Image (cartoon, grey):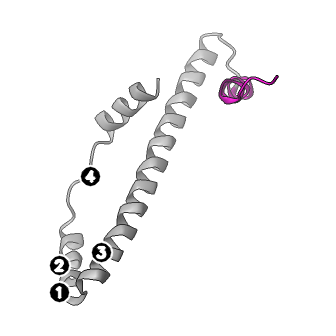
Amino acid sequence: MKDYMTALYLRFCGSPEQDPEAEALAQTLRERLDREQRRALLKLIDRYNAYCEAQTEAAFIAGFRLAAGIAMDLRGGWYSFEEEEERRGSATLPNAK
């Protein structure tokens, strides 16, 4: 299911276009920072981008689940967010002995 949601996210959200202002700022930083400073900055930016991407994908999946729940509710399926969360939580817990 996660693969399907990721594919939908990439299909509808895709990758953003390059921002000319960001490119100009990056060029300025390349000129002003030494090699080690650029590396540290790029690592920070990479981690921040990975975090933002994960949060955006999670929000997309949550929105999709919400829409699916509303659709089920409208057709009489009586969707319950709490029950779904309980099912998801119990599915990830190891079996108690």
Q: CA distance from mark 1 to mark 2?
A: 6 Å
- The numbered disc on residue 39 is 3
Q: Nearer the viewer, mark 3 or mark 1?
A: 3
- The numbered disc on residue 16 is 4
- The numbered disc on residue 31 is 1
Q: CA distance from mark 3 to mark 1?
A: 13 Å
Q: Which residues are magenta?
A: 81-97
- Identified at 74% across, 28% down, the residue is 82
Q: Nearer the viewer, mark 3 or mark 4?
A: 3
At label 1, counting other C-alpha atoms closer than 10 Å, the crowd grade (few under 14, some 14-19, many 20 or more) is: few
In the rendered view, would you say 84 is above or below 74? Answer: below
At label 2, counting other C-alpha atoms closer than 10 Å, the crowd grade (few under 14, some 14-19, many 20 or more) is: few
Q: Which amino acid, by three-letter code, is at mark 1?
A: Glu
- Would you say 93 lies left or right of 59 here? right
Q: Are marks 3 and 1 in contact (CB under 8 Å)?
A: no
User: Which element type, helix, strand or loop, lies under badge 4?
Assistant: loop
Q: Which residue is mark 2?
A: 27
